[in-house]
Amino acid sequence: MFTNILLVYDGSHSDQQQLLHRLNFNQWRGAAITLAAMIPNNDFVSGAIEVNYVSDSQRLVFDQEVMTILNNGVKLLNGMGLNTSGQLVSCDPISQIIEFSKKQEVDLIILNQSQNKYLANGWKSRLFINYVIEQSPCSILITKG
């Protein structure tokens, strides 16, 4: 039985909803669940194929929107009787998921493999998924969006 679960999505409402509505959470009652919106930081985005400059004020608005979406997802899961917390992580998602999982002693990572509208190269590509599978300290469940 899994006791510490990390649900990862790209910060968008659509990716969060795809992830949350594809799973049967009854099997994870009693587990600690972290819903993590992992959004790329400016350093990571600058390595993407297409880069759009984002000012500090635009980034602040974006982060606030992502936080609202995250809080709504946490409320939804808590309303289902699940022990859920939220985490907004601005990072290089590829390495941070592994580091976060180790630090939090996660025993299951759940990802929704879908097109990421915030990155030109989509950080949840097959290459990314393969990296997470190879480097993960725990079990992984991938849903297809």
Image: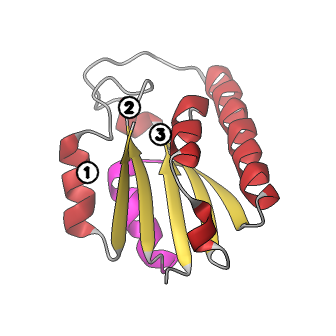
Between 18 and 67, which is closer to the camera in this rendering? 18
Disc 1 and disc 2 in contact, CB within 8 angstroms: no
How would you rate the neighbour count of disc 3 (Cα within 10 Å): few for under 14, some for 14-19, many for 20 or more?
some
Residue 140 falls within the magenta-colored stretch? no
Q: Are marks 3 and 2 in contact (CB under 8 Å)?
A: yes
| Label 2 crowd bin: few (<14), some (14–19), many (20+), radius 10 Å | many
Q: Give the percent coordinates (x, y) of residue 73.
A: 70, 46
Which x, y percent locates residue 60?
68, 30
Task: Give the residue displayed 46% in from the left and 17% down from the top.
Answer: 53
Q: Which residue is mark 3?
A: 41
Rendered image quadrant of residue 45: top left
Report, in whole angstroms, how far the alpha carbon at label 1 lies from the one at label 2: 18 Å
Q: Which residues are magenta?
A: 91-105
| Dot 1 or dot 2, earlier in sequence | 2
Residue at image point 37% right, 39% down: 44
Is residue 118 or residue 115 the one in the foreground? 115
Horizontally, residue 64 falls left or right of residue 111, namely right
Residue at numbered disc 1: 129
Query: Which three-letter amino acid code belongs to the residue tagged 3?
Result: Asn
Q: Quadrant of residue 85?
A: bottom right
Real-space Cα separation, disc 3 to disc 1, in angstroms: 19 Å
How far from the left and from the top, in percent, is residue 99? 40, 68
Residue at 60% over, 56% down = 35
Above/below status of 20 relative to 120: below
Indicate the secondary structure of the residue bearing disc 1.
helix
Q: Tell me which amino acid carries mark 1.
A: Ile
- Which residue bears the numbered disc 2? 45
Q: Is residue 98 magenta?
A: yes
Of marks 1 and 2, the one in the foreground: 1
Within the image, what quadrant is residue 96 found in?
Answer: bottom left
**Reading the chain from its start, which is encountered first: label 3 or label 1?**
3
Q: Position of residue 2 (x, y in %)?
A: 50, 80
